[in-house]
C-alpha cells in the first residue's frame, strides 16, 4: 500500500492530512478501531498522530524501552533511507507515552536508539473516555544521526508500517496498515512495509 505524507510548515496541519486505517488479523476478534495521520514538518521532523477507540487502556510498563507491546500499544516502524540502508526503527508506545525505540535489520540484535542519539523522539498521549491518542514526533536531527540523511523533499520514499497491539489484554489483537502475510503474529517483517511517499 501507499500513503501520501504531506510536507507541511506547521505541525497543526496534521489535522488536514489524509487518514490511514488499520485492519486486524491472526485472532478471531478484531481489536479497537484505529486510525492515524502523518506529515513531514519541513526542517523539523516527522509527525505521526494515531487514535484508537479503546476505553481504559492497559499501561503497566514505564521502564525505558519496556515491553509496551504487552500493554495497549500503538506503533510506527520506519526505514527513513531504504535505498541505502536495511535498518528500520520501531517506535512503540503505550497509553502512558512510554516509548520503546530500537533500530536494526530484523527482530534480532536491535540497538536502543536512546544510546545512539542526542535528541530522542517524543511520544505524547492523551486518554479520553472513549479513545486515546498517540502523537509521535521524530526530529530530523535524530534521523540524520541514525541514517545520515536530513534533507527530505517531495518524491522521497520511506518504507514503513503502522500497528496496534495488546498482547496481554483480555482480547489480544494485532492491527496493521499494510498487510503482513505470515501465519503467526510478527510485526518485525520489513518485507511487508508499505510505501510512505512525501508529497506537496
Image (cartoon, rainbow, N blue to C red):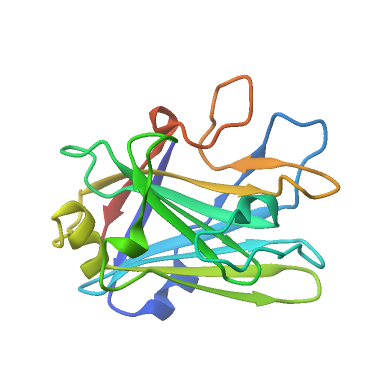
Is the residue 174 above or below the residue 66 in the image? Answer: above
- Residue drawn 27% across the image and 50% down it: 80
Residue 12 in percent (x, y) is at 43, 80
- Residue 183 occupies which quadrant of the picture? top right
Number of numbered discs: 0
Q: Residue 70: x percent and y percent?
A: 68, 50
Q: Nearer the viewer, residue 165 or 47?
A: 165
Q: Say above or below: 77 vs 65.
A: above
Residue 36, located in which quarter of the rendered image? bottom right
Q: Quadrant of the C terminus?
A: bottom left
Find residue 76 and report its horizontal and vertical position in percent.
Answer: 47, 52
Which residue appears at 53% of the width and 53% of the height? 75
In the visual, does 69 lie left or right of 83? Answer: right
Pick whichever, 157 or 100, lies toward us: 100
Return the x and y of residue 26 as percentages of the image width and height: 70, 29
Q: Quadrant of the N terminus?
A: top left
Question: Residue at the location (71% across, 64% down)?
Answer: 60
- Going by the image, does 31 lie left or right of 88? right
Residue furthest toward the right? 170
Amino acid at each position: 500500500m501507499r500513503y501520501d505524507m504531506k510536507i507541511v510548515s506547521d505541525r497543526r496541519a496534521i489535522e488536514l492530512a489524509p487518514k490511514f486505517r488499520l485492519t486486524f488479523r491472526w485472532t478471531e476478534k478484531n481489536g479497537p478501531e484505529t486510525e492515524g495521520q502523518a506529515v513531514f514538518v519541513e526542517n523539523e521532523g516527522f509527525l505521526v498522530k494515531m487514535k484508537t477507540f479503546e476505553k481504559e487502556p492497559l499501561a503497566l510498563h514505564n521502564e525505558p524501552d519496556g515491553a509496551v507491546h504487552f500493554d495497549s500499544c500503538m506503533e510506527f516502524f520506519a526505514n527513513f533511507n531504504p535505498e541505502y540502508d536495511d535498518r528500520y526503527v520501531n517506535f512503540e508506545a503505550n497509553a502512558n507515552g512510554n516509548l520503546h525505540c530500537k533500530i536494526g535489520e530484523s527482530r534480532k540484535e536491535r540497538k536502543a536508539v536512546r544510546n545512539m542519539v542526542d535528541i530522542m523522539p517524543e511520544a505524547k498521549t492523551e486518554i479520553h473516555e472513549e479513545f486515546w491518542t498517540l502523537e509521535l514526533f521524530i526530529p530530523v536531527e535524530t534521523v540524520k544521526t541514525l541514517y545520515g540523511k536530513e534533507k527530505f523533499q517531495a518524491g522521497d520514499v520511506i518504507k514503513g508500517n503502522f500497528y496496534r497491539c495488546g498482547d496481554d489484554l483480555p482480547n489480544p489483537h494485532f492491527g496493521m496498515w499494510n498487510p503482513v502475510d505470515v501465519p503467526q503474529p510478527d510485526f518485525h517483517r520489513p518485507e511487508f512495509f508499505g510505501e510512505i511517499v512525501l508529497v506537496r
